[in-house]
Amino acid sequence: QVQLVESGGGLVQAGGSLRLSCAASGSSTSVMDMAWYRQAPGDQRKSVAIITSGGTFYADSVKGRFTISRDNPKNTLYLQMNNLKPEDTGLYYCNAVRSLGATSRAYWGQGTQVTVSS
């Protein structure tokens, strides 16, 4: 069973920065595809950044401002968010997909709130 625990959210002014962390247990971050999702009020959950063995991928709205990375010895996923905008406000979730043979399973953290004031 994979467990994911996010931290690092908070209230920040527009133009500021935050770094989110996601501590994983039960599997190594090095063998999982991992991602950060955002759910804004009244909206569905959407991916903002993904990291796989093939590289990193970003939503157009965050390209050039957000950076996803992972520290495999620490088994932790990060999201560095710079030049934050009010539209970045939302609940940020850590996601991990672990493949076991022909099947795969997705895991979610509990979310961490990011609020950007104008």
Image (tube, rainbow, N blue to C red):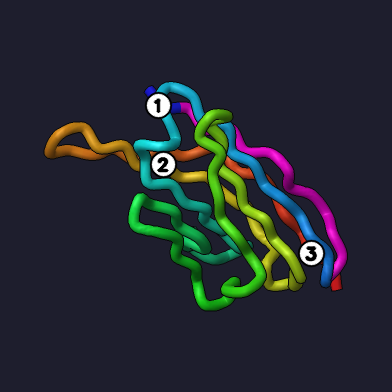
Q: Which residue is tagged 3?
A: 116
Q: Farthest residue toward the bottom?
A: 60
Is 54 located above or below residue 13 in the figure?
above
Mark 1 burial class by Cα count in 10 Å: few <14, some 14-19, many 20+: some
Which element carries disc 3, helix, strand or loop?
Answer: strand
Residue 22: x %, y % from top left: 59, 38
Crowdedness near tag 2: few (<14), some (14–19) or many (≥20) residues, C-alpha within 10 Å:
many
Query: Are the residues tagged 1 and 2 within 8 Å (C-beta)?
Result: yes
Residue under the image location 31 percent in, 37 percent down: 98
The residue positioned 62% from the left and 74% from the top of the image is 64
Disc 1 secondary structure class:
loop
* Majority secondary structure of magenta residues: strand
**Label number found at residue 53:** none
Disc on the earlier residue, 1 or 2: 1
For the record, the magenta segment spans 3-14
In front of the other: label 1 or label 2?
1
